[in-house]
Amino acid sequence: MSQISVTGQTAIERATTEARPVYFPRRKKGIRPRSIAILVFLTMCAAFFCVPLYVIVVTSLKTMDQIRLGEIFSLPEVWTVQPWLTAWNDACSGINCNGLKVGFVNSLAILFPSLILSLAISSVTGYALALWNVRWAGPFMFLLFMCAFVPFQIIMIPLIVLSGMLKIYGTVWGIAIVHAVLSMPLLTLIFRNYYKDIPNEIMRAAMMDSGSFWRTFFEIILPMSGNILIVVLIMQITSIWNDFLVGLTFGGLGTQPMTVILANVVITTTGEVVYNENMAAALLTAIPPLVIYFFLGKFFVQGITAGAIKG
Amino acid sequence: MRIRWSRWAPQLALTPAVAITMVAFLGSMVWTIYISLTRSRRFPDYEIDWSEWGRQYARLFNDDAWLIALKNLLILGVGSTLAIGFGFILACLIDREKRGEGFFRTVFLYPLAVSLIVTGVAWRWLFDPNLGLQAFFHSIGLTWLRFDWLASGDTAIYGIILASVWQGSGFYMALMLAGLKGINTEIWSAARLDGVSTWKFYTEIVIPMMRFTFLTCAILLSLGVVKAYDIVVAMTNGGPGQSTWVPAYFTISAYWQKSNLGYASAAAVIMLLITAAVFLPMVLLTLWQQRRSGRVAA
Amino acid sequence: MPSVSFEHIVKSYGAITVLNDLNLSIDDGDFLVLLGPSGCGKTTLLNLLAGLLEVTDGRITIGDRDVTDLDPKDRGLAMVFQSYALYPTKTVRGNLKFGLSASKLPPEEVEQRIAWAAKLLQIEPLMNRKPAELSGGQRQRVAIGRALVKKVGVFLFDEPLSNLDAKLRTEMRLEIKKLHDELNPTIVYVTHDQIEAMTMATRIAVMDGGVIQQFGTPDEIYERPANIFVAGFIGSPAMNMLDARLKVDGARILAEVEGAVGGIDLSDYPFMNRPNDGAQIVLGLRPEHFGPLGVILPDAAGTIALPVQYGERTGSDATVYFRTGGKLLAARLDPSQLHAARQGETMSVSFLKGRANVFDARTGRRL
């Protein structure tokens, strides 16, 4: 109900049309000195975080002549993308000089199957553990919890042997499957915790309506999982793309992911170190997850807290 | 929700996960532990000489490289706690000064999107004695400043620590921010009304209230340090000499370079034990926290 | 429409037994309300009937089928939940359709049923909306629609009106009653709200502590409660419970109670067994069965003279509270009389004949 004045205007209309008489002039508060100090400090920290990135970018666009001069922070005098092209096409990883593009393709080829496998298994397992009555669910989840923390090295050799027996060792599929296996415990727990929050009554209604494990999953639960799927997807993409050890252990000639190629390029160099190419190679490897980060950062943060605060 | 077919369907659906857990995890662990008791070299040798079942472990702890690796693990662990402290400070500042929270959070967190190999490559470049930061500092007159830590066996590990802190602070900052936001806003208001000084407020109220978050960070950090491998490879590849070897590096090297299954397995088992030692408090912590959330949370 | 029966139902969770040897028989077409406070076991019983919980022991039959071991979807039931439980990612049409996913009906039949339910509940214009875009009342209708399309004989309602505001509640009560009148299914309805129970039920089972305290029509429950619990649960303001002693003198039976001059005459009370002289009883007097304030009625069962504690008005009604032995005695009166009630002053009010309830002081059961 608006208060209509004698002239028919509402209080709100009056406030916006008339000039308000000032009775007690107030001094405008500026920004407090403490805020400035904090912001300055934070900006310096931000600079600290940006330095490596800046240096890589700048170095990758310089010519070797300029690099040899040693001014690490200076901008390129002559901007050149040649290092990028060389890194992409001709960089030498061991005896193969086919550039990072090989690694890029491999990383992609590893990424997609691995994503599908890990998401499929973990979501269904999490769903079964969260919303269905399985008597041994408690102990099993504790087991999963422990497996999530186990160091890779303790299961590395048997996995190598197993993948050899299954004839997937050294293949892109092998790497993908190992990634899916290693990430299964953590992702399952994340899905399970998410599904635990689904209102109880929805499952009860689904039991009355359908009673089917799979139908309920695909028609009711999965459509409700949008949020967690994106978060997990981003977590997995980052983790798989940036992984080194698994790719090193299970990758063969021609199937190594980008990070392994990068490491080979940078570490095993004979002769002069071609810094700008190395930096360009590093950037090429870093860009895909960084792009995802800058566009979907919000889900990234959710992934961190989901991954860290579990159980 | 569990009558008849409804009882079987979920259990069937769980079989892949159960199979993976049993075979790939538990079975593998048991196998590795077993092999660590054998004399396997290039190929598994399943015979255990029970009179000398611990010989691989004895060899291990007589191996200088392993002892260096353990020492480095400790140094790395202690040094990396800087990341937690730094993360906490950043979180407090951001939480305090609401302006620019989105921007700063984005900047501090981006290292997490970057592979440790890339991080290692970048910092290796920064540590280059002639062309990196040292050259820069010298060129602006700070000739006494040495930034060639990776060149010397004594200081190389600190270079790795610096790079780790750079990479990880954002992560701990994110966890701390979440913990800070969990502190009831009324507590801030009450402190303001009481006129508590900032320093006292943080040391006597905030930090004790964030006990659980700190503990979580410490445990996650420890687990991460045990797994440290990529960054070592990228920055120093274990060098100079063996001065930056860590247990993970040792284990991988024992397998690939030395082709000694038994030896590598023993090293892996020790890694597992260290992980378990860190993990146990985590389990107790989770149980304690579950019990605590039954009561009124502070 | 089938009848439902529970035989010797036992439900335990480990060492804790929630329902112990419960028996209940519901006729076809009945609107049975399970009424009771929270924790009394009514929701457990409903879930057992639905099949969402498994019985520890006992048998449940629907019609002439033993459904004790059947899955919920095979029992021929439909359920409406307290928070509607609509599938958030599906449209109204999708929700109704999913209700039929267990049945293997041809698509035309499915469409037909959806159209019929939509028309009946007047939700046709909402068919393509998602639950988030619906109001509370609309959601409840869709939830009912999802149950209707199954075209089963038994409907289960789990406190469906608790989440609605008062006005909507009244509307939906009428809707549900209308549905029952039109389609005549057997309904099992759980609630803690006695108004819903009294207005909608054909039979009420009042429960407390896992035990059915009384099973009967709303009138029976209200007029002749079987024990103190039922008597106190139904009726607002609650029935006054006064400790008293019986004085039996031949055909004349009197209840000696504090504040009643000359006691309350119970000579015409239908005792089940002849009462003993000196028996300790609890006398139950409903507030609305008192006469006007300050008036001593000649043919009353008795008259209470007690100090007034306070009086309150609830719109169309007024209640005056008297103080007696540490408790309050409530008496309903016309709002116009309220001004006459002065605090602290002892005033009289008569209790009408034939309206008293007598309970054994020790067992609480009706005498």
Image (cartoon, coloured by chain):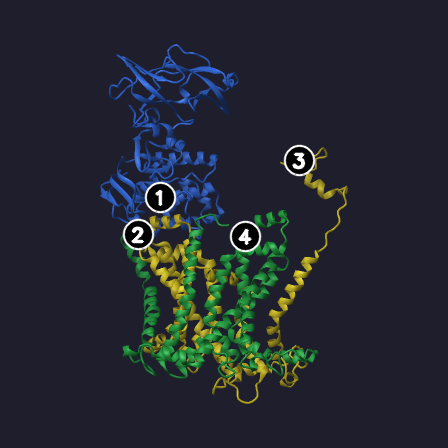
Chain colours: A yellow, B green, C blue
Q: Is residue A293 left or right of residue C152?
A: right
Please tell me whether mark 1 sits on a helix, a strand or a loop.
Answer: strand
Q: Amino acid at mark 1?
A: Met
Residue, disc 2:
B2
In this rendering, the label closer to the viewer, 1 or 4: 4
The chain that hosts pointer 3 is A
Query: Is residue C231 shown to the viewer in this render?
Result: yes
Nearest to N terminus: mark 4 or mark 2: 2
Residue C200 position within the rendered picture, expressed as x and y whole percent measured from the top left: 37, 32
Question: Residues under labels 1 and 3: Cα distance?
Answer: 49 Å
Circles 4 and 2, Cβ within 8 Å, touching? The answer is no
State the residue position of label 4: B183
**Closer to the camera in the image, B241 or C7:** B241
Dot 4 crowding, Cα within 10 Å, few <14, some 14–19, many 20+: some
Mark number, residue A3: 3
Q: Chain of mark 2?
A: B
C-alpha span from label 1 to label 4? 42 Å
Picture coordinates of residue C197, whole percent (x, y): 37, 32
Give the spatial CA distance, label 2 vs label 1: 18 Å
For marks 3 and 4, give the one nearer the viewer.
4
Identify the element where label 2 is drawn: loop
Mark 4 vs mark 2, foreground winner is 4
Q: From the image, state whether disc 2 or disc 1 is nearer to you.
A: 2
* Disc 3 residue crowd, few under 14, some 14–19, many 20+, Cα 10 Å: few
Q: Is residue A3 above or below residue C256?
A: below
Which element carries disc 4, helix, strand or loop? loop
- Which chain's residue wears label 4? B
Relative depth, front residue between A293 and C41: C41
- Depth check: give the residue in front, C241 or A179: C241
**Residue placed under numbered mark 1 in the picture:** C79
- Tell me residue B153's x, y (percent): 53, 81
Percent x, y of residue A23 = 77, 41
